[in-house]
Image (cartoon, helix red, strand yellow):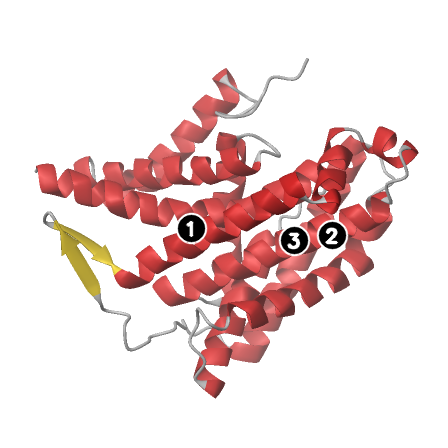
Amino acid sequence: MHVMLVQSLVFGILVGALYGLAAVGLSLVFGVTKLLNVAHGELLMFGGYATFWIFTLYGVDPFLALPVTMIFLILIGVIVYGLLFARMVKLSEETKIQNTLLVGFGLSLILQNLALRLWTADDRGVTTAYSGWAFTLLGVRFPIVRVASLGIALAALGALHLFLQKTYTGKAIRATAEDWEAASLMGIDIHRIYLLAFVLGTAMAGIAGALVSVGYSIEPNMGLEWTLIALIVMVLGGLGSIMGTFVGGIVLGVTQALTSCFIGGTYREVVGLLIFLLVLIFRPQGLFGAKER
């Protein structure tokens, strides 16, 4: 029983890291721009397909293909932002959220049908020579692919954190998130910062999609599920909190794993949604978010 509990915790952390990475991009975009892009899951799906086709057509290892996948998603992010979201940045926050919800739902339908048209509804996945490899430590099994995915997720999060904390552009992004009017008065190009934040969020979705294609399967209708996961994790961690969002993903993953272990896999989604509702009721700023004054 002890080994089973530890094994569930390990799998929960490995899955939760992927949840957190998927939600970090959405949290960054919303925290800076107040654009709620509910097509985030579809962007993640395109990252998965990009990795799959790079591996299938050219034989490039999915982890080595990450830079190409990121560039592909960055290009998509630039196009999507320029065509759909750029014209909404001057709206009031409430109107901006309402409009981006509508645009995001429309975009998600377009991207779903585009993927369905291009690649059919078949499930795809990247199977490498080491996909089934694992090592055992104290009776607990650690799959190589998921451990590597955890390492990449932590590296991506660390790089994003250093960029936001140590670079001038990163500080400009944080200043814009705090007060865009004051940032504008200080000479910061708000439109450029919004575009950069959106592109960074898209790139993070691309990395998450690549890792999903290696550890799980991808198909055109997966976007909604991952968007919901990202929204739940973002609220759990705290809106706009990058580190809090990632930890929120770990919390959700561990909770689901323990639920599957003790109650049954049927209830894992229900328990996750229950925690989501309790956080909304008793701590709406999230587990790691600061209260607004």
Apparent side of residue 123 relative to residue 102 in the rendered image (left or right): left
Query: Residue 98, can we see it?
Result: no
Apparent side of residue 167 relative to residue 132 in the rendered image (left or right): right
Q: Earlier in the sequence, mark 3 or mark 1?
A: 1
Disc 1 packing (10 Å; few <14; some 14–19; many ≥20): many
In the rendered image, which quarter contains the C terminus? Answer: top right
Give how far apart the Cα atoms at labels 2 and 3 are: 6 Å
Q: Position of residue 112 (x, y in %)?
A: 58, 65
* Secondary structure found at label 3: helix
Mark 2 in CB contact with mark 3 (< 8 angstroms): yes
Numbered tag placed on residue 200 in the rendering: 3
Type of residue at label 3? Leu
Disc 3 packing (10 Å; few <14; some 14–19; many ≥20): many
Q: Is residue 78 above or below residue 253?
A: below
Disc 2 packing (10 Å; few <14; some 14–19; many ≥20): many
Q: Residue at x 47, y 40 (%)?
A: 246
Q: Earlier in the sequence, mark 1 or mark 2?
A: 1
Q: Position of residue 287 (x, y in %)?
A: 48, 25
Apparent side of residue 23 relative to residue 146 in the rendered image (left or right): right
Numbered tag placed on residue 238 in the rendering: none
Judging depth in this view, the residue of 3 and 267 nearest the camera is 3
Which residue has dot 1 on it? 18
* Secondary structure found at label 1: helix
Number of marks drawn: 3
Check the image and name the residue furthest to the top.
293
Q: Residue at x 34, y 33 (%)?
A: 271
Q: Position of residue 29 (x, y in %)?
A: 67, 44
Q: Residue at x 68, y 58 (%)?
A: 107
Which mark lies nearer to you, 1 or 2? 2
Which residue has dot 2 on it? 196
